[in-house]
Image (cartoon, helix red, strand yellow):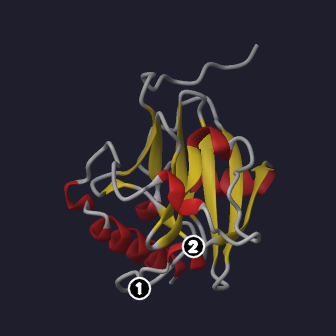
Amino acid sequence: MAVKRFAAALSGLMLAFGFADARADQNVEFKAGECSGSPDAAVMKLPFPLSKWGQVQCTKYGHVLASQNGWLWILPAAGPVLVPSQVTMGDPKELGNDSYFTKIEITQVKGDEFVNTYQTLMTNLDKDEVKPDGYRVDISTNSGETLKIYFFDYDTYAWGMDCSSSCDTDSRFILLDKNHKPEPRHASI
């Protein structure tokens, strides 16, 4: 259910922002001044390493977690990825700063949690690569919604996957550094 809400919210925002063509430059209605007036409870800064790839941006539809400058988040065959604070099954409402994140926490994952999530992520992908670092991002919004997204850092690129209710390969997306070609991770000495 959460995956469907996540996908519907992404689709609704992509359409609202004119992403029907999946434009890579993402020059949509993100204006630098729109974050002024955000409530004190709004999370505006991201913990590392999420801050390497992402940032909170303010839109007329509420705050969204989006790619950092120089990075691109892409859902294969669908286009750019935004994680909205307004998780809705239908058309998003113009809530501005009244829809925001109240928690964005990152935890490095290891052991069974890493193995199980990584195994799902790698379904139909190359399993012979050197393993990435894995992170779980727990997100809460002021409307009481919660999301759980896993990120797998390969140094020159990363993968993300929504696991809010269960991990689903349809929700996986790739994070690309616009200035560097993705390269396989090298084994440590």
Dot 2 crowding, Cα within 10 Å, few <14, some 14–19, many 20+: many
Residue at the farthest left position: 21
The quadrant of the rendering that contains the C terminus is: top right
Tell me: residue 68, above or below residue 34.
Answer: above
| Residue under the image location 46 percent in, 56 percent down | 172
Q: Amino acid at mark 1?
A: Met
Task: Please provide percent x and percent y for residue 137.
Answer: 69, 58
Dot 1 crowding, Cα within 10 Å, few <14, some 14–19, many 20+: some
Task: Please provide percent x and percent y for residue 14.
Answer: 33, 65
Q: Secondary structure at mark 1?
A: loop
Of badges 1 and 2, the one in the foreground is 2
Task: Please provide percent x and percent y for residue 134.
Answer: 69, 45
| Residue under the image location 68 percent in, 67 percent down | 139
Left/right placement of residue 178 relative to residue 155 reads left
Q: Amino acid at mark 2?
A: Asn
Left/right placement of residue 103 relative to residue 34 reads right
| Residue under the image location 51 percent in, 24 percent down | 184
| Residue under the image location 43 percent in, 56 percent down | 30
Mark linked to residue 97: 2
- Foreground residue, 177 or 109? 177
Q: Which residue is mark 1?
A: 89
Tell me: residue 8, above or below residue 44.
Answer: below
Tell me: residue 87, above or below residue 158.
Answer: below
Mark 1 to mark 2 CA distance (whole Å): 20 Å
Name which of mark 1 and mark 2 comes first in the sequence: 1
Task: Please provide percent x and percent y for residue 98.
Answer: 58, 79
Q: Secondary structure at mark 2?
A: helix
- Foreground residue, 82 or 126? 82
